[in-house]
Image: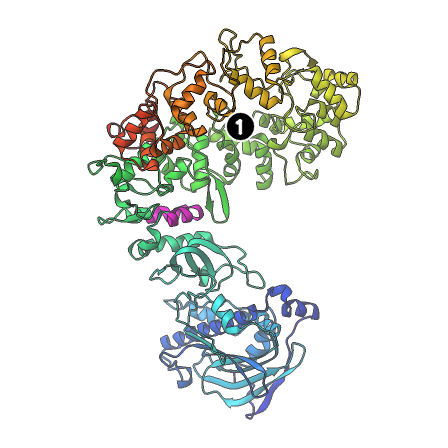
Amino acid sequence: MHRDDARMSPPGRPVGDPLTFHLSDRVLALLMGTSLYGDSRFAFRELHQNAVDACRHHDARAEYLRRSGQDLPSGAAREPGAPRIVVREFEDTSGSRVLECRDTGVGMGYLQLASAFCQAGVRGRELEEDADEREAFAQLDEPIEFWTNSRFGIGAFSYFMVADAVSVTTTRLNRDGSLGRRLSFDVTGPHTPGLVVDHGPGEAAGTTVRLALKDGHASPIAVLRDLVAVSPYDVEAFDDRGRQHRWEAGVLNRESGAVEPDAQIVADPAGKVWWCSGRGAVLPDGIWSGAMTLGIIVNLTGDDAPPMTADRTTMIDTDFAQVDVLALAAVGSAVQEGAAIVGRADWLDRTFAWNHEIVDAIIREASGPPSPFPIVLDPETRTVDATIAGYVPGDGEGVPPDAWSFTRLIAGGAYPELGIDGSEWNSFVAGLPTDAVLLGRPGSTMAGETTTPVAPWRGDALSLYAAENSLRRPTATILERARTLGLPIDAELDNLPESTEFVRRVVTDAAAHQAASDRVIGAFAVVRASGDLGITLADARDQLRDRALTYDPCLDGLVDEPPTGGELRLASVRGDGVAPWRTTKELSIATVAAIAANAGVSSSQAIRALQRLGFGPIRGLLDGTRWLSRDFDAVDVLLASRDLDGSMPFLPSVEVSRDHIRRGAHNAHISESAARSRLEALGYHQVDGVAAAESGYEQLELVDDEGNPLDLVNPLPIAHAAILARRLKRPLTAVVARLEELGYRIAPYDVVPGPQHLIAASREADGELPCHPVHLGVPPIAVHFAAFSSDENPPTVVGMLRSQGYQVASGDILPRLEDRHRAMLYWLADSDITGGDAPVPPITVLQLALRVNLSLDRCLTTLTELGLTGADPRRHLPVDRPGDDAAWRGLY
C-alpha cells in the first residue's frame, strides 16, 4: 500500500514523534540568514516554487491514475477556472502580519513532512516512494514527464528568514488515488519541536503554508511579481492593502524584472520563447534570476533547466545550446508575428552581438516568403526589403561601407533619393548577418558566454579557422559561403580538417594581424593552450601542421626542449609560473629589468628565456646593441629611453647626441662620462649634429612621406619654419638660421605668417606639418579646405598663400563657400582624397550624396566646384559580391 495511513490516530491527536528541522547550528545560520540566499525575499520565491512542484506532482499522479482506469476522489478534482496557487498576506486577530500560500497540489503525509520538508537538502524525489513512482511513470508507453525544481528542506528553512513561525496544513493524494489524512504541523522556530496533528480524513488534496512574518519584511506580492516571470499554473496573489497580481499559466508576466518596461513582446506558440524589443533573459523554470540576453526571453524548464547555486539565484551551467535550439525553433513566430520587433536594424545588430545564429536564421526565414519583409533602418523613415537585399549588421547605420552593400540596399528600396533604379538587378548576392564575420565588420561574436574577436577574411588557413572560431560552423559551410561572396580562397583549404579546441584557442591573436608576415601562431600561445588542455607540445604542433597554420619557429625548439619552471615563472605576471601571463605588447627592456630583479636572475638571462618562449620583439632591444651580452639595470634603461624617464618609447637608433647623454646623466644622478660609458657598453655611440635622432631639432620633419630626406634643391615655405618655431618654442629667426645651416633655403615671403597663414600652407589645413611644397601649385581643393578650416573666403586664402611664395594651381576658386560646400568638405576631411588626377571613387560619391543630403547630380556638381572630379556611380553599379568590390575599388 502507498497510502499515508500508517500514522492514523483519532482526530485531533498528535501523530508520531515531534518534528524539528534537522541541521547543524552553523549550517542553519547559513541557510536562515542572508549569507546563502543573499536576500531574504527569496524565501517568498521558495514558497511559490514548492507550491508549483506540488501541483506538478499532483498532475503527474492524477494522469497516471487516469491512464490506469482509476477515478479521482472529488477532493482531488480541480475547480474549473480557479487558480491552482493562491498567495495572500493579511493581518490576523493579534495584529501580526501573516503570509498564506495555498496550493491544490499533491500534499504531504507524515513521511514527507518528516523526511523531506524538515530535512534540509532532501528532495521529495529522493524518497523511496517517489523514486518508485517516477519509475512507474517512465515505464508507460508514453512516459509521464515529472520534474521538480524546489529543494524542499532547504527551501523550507529559508522561510525562517522572513518568519518567526511556520504553520502547515496538508492532505496528500495517495498513489492509489485516495485522499490521506488532514495533517497540521506548527513550529515556532527552526530549533523548536513541532507536533504533527491528525485532523481526520482529508477532504481536498493540497497544502496551505502560513508564515508569521517578521517586522520589516518586503511585500511578498511585490517580490513574487518581480521574480516569477512565468508560472506553469494560474496563480493569484493579493494582500489586504490593495496589492494584487495574477499569473496566467504559461503567460509571460510583463511586470517581472525579466521584462523591460514598455517592451514589445511576442510569444512563440510553444510557450518557451518570447521575442522582445529590448533586453531579454534566460529563465530557470520561469524565475527571473538576473541572467540577461538580448532580444529574446527563453524559459528553461524540465530537463532543459540548468543547475542552480545553493541559493538558486544563479545558474551554474546554462545550456546555451538548448537556448539556441528553442530560439531557432521559434524563428517562424519571430518573422510572422514579431516583425515589428525583429524587423528593425537596431534589434538585429544588438541581438547579433549576443547570438549570430538566431539573427541569421531570422533573415533566412524572412527571405523565404514572397511577400516583402521590411527592415527599419536609421533613420526610421528608411526601410529595406530583406527578401531582396537580405541583411548584414551595419546596413542600418545610414551610409553603406561598400559597393556591394549599396547594390543590395538600393535594390531593396532603401535609398530612393539617389534616383538609381535597382529593380532589374537580379544577379547580386543577398546578404546574411553572418557575412559580417567574413567581412570583418563586428568586433566580436559570442558563443554562450564566450566572446571571440572577429578577424577579416584573407583567404588563408588562419582566416578559415578564425571564422570557424567565430561562427562555430563546419569549415565546408564557411568555404561555401566565402565562395558565394567571391572572397579569395587558397586552394589547400578544401582539404583541411575541422578545427579543435586547441586550434580555437591559438588562432585569435594571430588572425587579428593584417600583414601576412605577422599571421603566425605565437609559440607561447601554444604553450599556454597546450598546458590548459593537457596535450603535449608535439601534439599541438602536429595539429597546426595538419591545418596549414604557420607557427613561430620558436615552437620547434620548445618541442625538443620544453619550457622549464624557471622560464614559466619569468613569463607569468606574478612570477609563480601560472596564469595570468605576460604579453609581448607589455615587454620592453624596462619590464625585463624588473622581471629579472624580482626573479633573481640576470637581465640578459631573462631576455634569452623570454625570447625562447616566443616573446618578441622586446621594445628597446635594437639591432647592433649589446643588451644580451651584458647585465643591465634601471639606470641603463633610463639612458636608453627617448624621454629619459625609463619607460617607452626607447631610442630608435644606436646613435645618440651629446645633449641626450648630458640630460641622461643629470636625470640618473651620474657623471656625463659614466652615462656615455654605460651607453657605449650597450652598443650605442655618440654622434653630433642632425644625425642624432634625438637632437634638439629631431622634429624638424625634413623628410618626405616615405621617410627620405627632403632634397635641398627646392626651397621650404616660411610656414615650415614658423610651425617648427612654435613647436620648439624658439625664435623664428633661429629656426630659419638652423635650417639654412643644414643646406635648406626658405622661399621668398612677404609677411611673417600668422595662424591663418599656417592653416593655408599646411597640407591637412590644420596649421601643422607637413606643408604644401612651395615649388608646386596649390590645387583649388586645397584652397577650399583651408578656407573651410580657417573660416575665411577662398580668395583670402589665395592671398595668404601667395604672400608666402606659393602659386595657386589653375582652376576655378569659389568666391565663397556655401553650406553644401562646407558639409562636403567636412566629410572629405578624413578621406585620402587630395585633388590629384584620379576621380573621387563612385562609392565615395554615393556616401557623400547621402551624408550631405544631395541628389547625385548635385553632389557631382559640388565636387566639381571644389576642384574635384567625381565618378558617376550610375555607370558602375551593380556590384554583385563583396569579393568584386576590391577589384572595383582598384579602378580608383
Residue 252 percent coordinates (x, y): 40, 65
Using the image, determine if residue 693 lies above or below residue 600.
Answer: above
Name the residue at the front extreme.
751
The percent coordinates of residue 729 (x first, y second) are 62, 23
Task: Between residue 149 and residue 67, name the one nearer to us.
Answer: 149
What main secondary structure does the magenta stretch of the protein show? helix
Q: Is residue 794 above or below residue 401?
A: above
Q: Amino acid at mark 1?
A: Tyr
Q: Is residue 516 above or below residue 240?
A: above
In reply to whether residue 887 is colored magenta, the answer given is no
**Magenta span contains residue 357:** yes
Residue 847 found in image quarter: top left
**Residue in front for this viewpoint, 740 or 544:** 740
Q: Is residue 675 above or below residue 853?
A: above
Q: Residue at x 49, y 41 (%)?
A: 452
Camera-side residue of 690 and 795: 795
Residue range in magenta is 346-362
Q: Residue 826 vs residue 716: left or right?
A: left
From this viewpoint, is residue 747 visible? yes
Q: For numbered disc 1, what is the local secondary structure?
A: loop
**Horizontal and vertical percent position of residue 832:** 41, 25
For mark 1, does the 10 Å Cα neighbourhood hold few (<14), some (14 to 19), or many (20 or more) residues?
Answer: many
Give the residue at mark 1. 551
Q: Quadrant of residue 798?
A: top left
Query: Would residue 831 be visible to someone looking at this image?
Result: no
* Residue 10 spot, x, y in % from top left: 56, 93
Q: Which picture quadrant has residue 176?
A: bottom left
Please count the marks in the image. Answer: 1
